[in-house]
């Protein structure tokens, strides 16, 4: 089983990178038999805005980026989406990247990790609705880091240990549903 951990911000100096690395390390430390975890950073894919008119000299690179994103996402059996919260929703870059997908993610499971003043909880509820439309089953347990208490100056990631309880439950749920959904694809 392959699980992709998607770091969902393209902002320079984003907090998603540190949170995603923590989630990857946590996942690898579980030593789940037969499960491979891989970190995918949205910032590494120079995706255009869906449907935007591009100058001719940018079209080939944009097409290649869309293709690479599609193939990478299709290669996983399940996902952990790590999302910031912007105006009580997922960030625009992650929403745009998800809008390129459909068959790549259908009938797969996903877990949600977030951070924000309320732990990214509102971004999660928004993301559940978006992923539901793509036939992705989002597990109940989430991991929510507070910008106030799990970061210093809202920018240096210093997660409290209690987050491990939620992360453990989240991965347990995710692997169960990923296995189950493998049987219907
Ligand atoms: C335009 C904008 C809107 C934001 N809206 C929210 C919000 O609604 N809730 C929240 O908790 N944080 C909000 N924030 C704070 C971001 O979640 C915070 O800056 C976070 O680090 C962004 O993630 P990133 O660094 O990975 O890009 C907002 C930040 C910006 C710039």
Image (cartoon, rainbow, N blue to C red):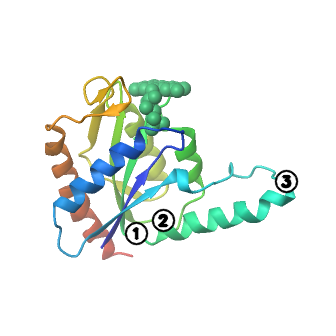
Which x, y percent locates residue 168?
16, 51
Question: The residue tagged with tag 1: helix, strand or loop?
Answer: loop
Total marks in image: 3
Label 3 to label 2: alpha-carbon separation: 27 Å
The structure residue drawn at horizontal position 48% and vertical position 70%, both measured from the top left corner, is 74
Q: What residue is shown with label 1?
A: 76
Question: The residue tagged with tag 3: helix, strand or loop?
Answer: loop
On screen, residue 11 versus residue 178, left or right, reads: right
Q: Quadrant of the C terminus?
A: bottom left
Q: Nearer the viewer, residue 178 or 26?
A: 26
* Label of residue 24 in the image: none
Q: What residue is shown with label 3?
A: 55
On screen, residue 12 versus residue 49, left or right, reads: left
Question: The residue tagged with tag 2: helix, strand or loop?
Answer: helix
The structure residue drawn at horizontal position 64% and vertical position 54%, both measured from the top left corner, is 47
The structure residue drawn at horizontal position 25% and vertical position 25%, both measured from the top left corner, is 149
Q: Nearer the viewer, residue 38 or 75?
A: 38
* Residue 87 visible in image: no
Q: Nearer the viewer, residue 112 or 28?
A: 28
Disc 1 crowd, CA 10 A, few/some/many (<14, 14-19, 20+): some
Q: Are marks 1 and 2 in contact (CB under 8 Å)?
A: yes
* Label of residue 73 in the image: 2
Disc 3 crowd, CA 10 A, few/some/many (<14, 14-19, 20+): few
């Amino acid at each position: 089983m392959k699980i992709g951990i998607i770091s969902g911000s393209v902002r320079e100096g984003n907090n998603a990178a540190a949170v995603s690395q923590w989630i990857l390390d946590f996942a690898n430390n579980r030593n789940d038999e037969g499960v491979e975890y891989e970190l995918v950073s949205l910032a590494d894919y120079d995706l255009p805005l869906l449907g935007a008119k591009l100058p001719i000299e940018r079209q080939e690179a944009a097409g290649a980026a869309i293709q690479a994103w599609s193939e990478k996402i299709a290669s996983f059996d399940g996902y952990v989406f790590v999302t910031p919260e912007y105006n009580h929703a997922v960030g625009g870059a992650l929403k745009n990247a998800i809008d390129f997908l459909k068959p790549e993610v259908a009938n797969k499971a996903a877990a949600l990790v977030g951070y924000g003043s309320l732990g990214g909880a509102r971004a999660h509820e928004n993301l559940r609705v978006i992923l539901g439309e793509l036939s992705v089953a989002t597990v109940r347990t989430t991991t929510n880091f507070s910008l106030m208490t799990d970061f210093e100056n809202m920018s240096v990631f210093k997660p409290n240990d209690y987050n491990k309880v939620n992360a453990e439950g989240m991965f347990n749920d995710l692997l169960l549903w990923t296995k189950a959904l493998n049987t219907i694809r």
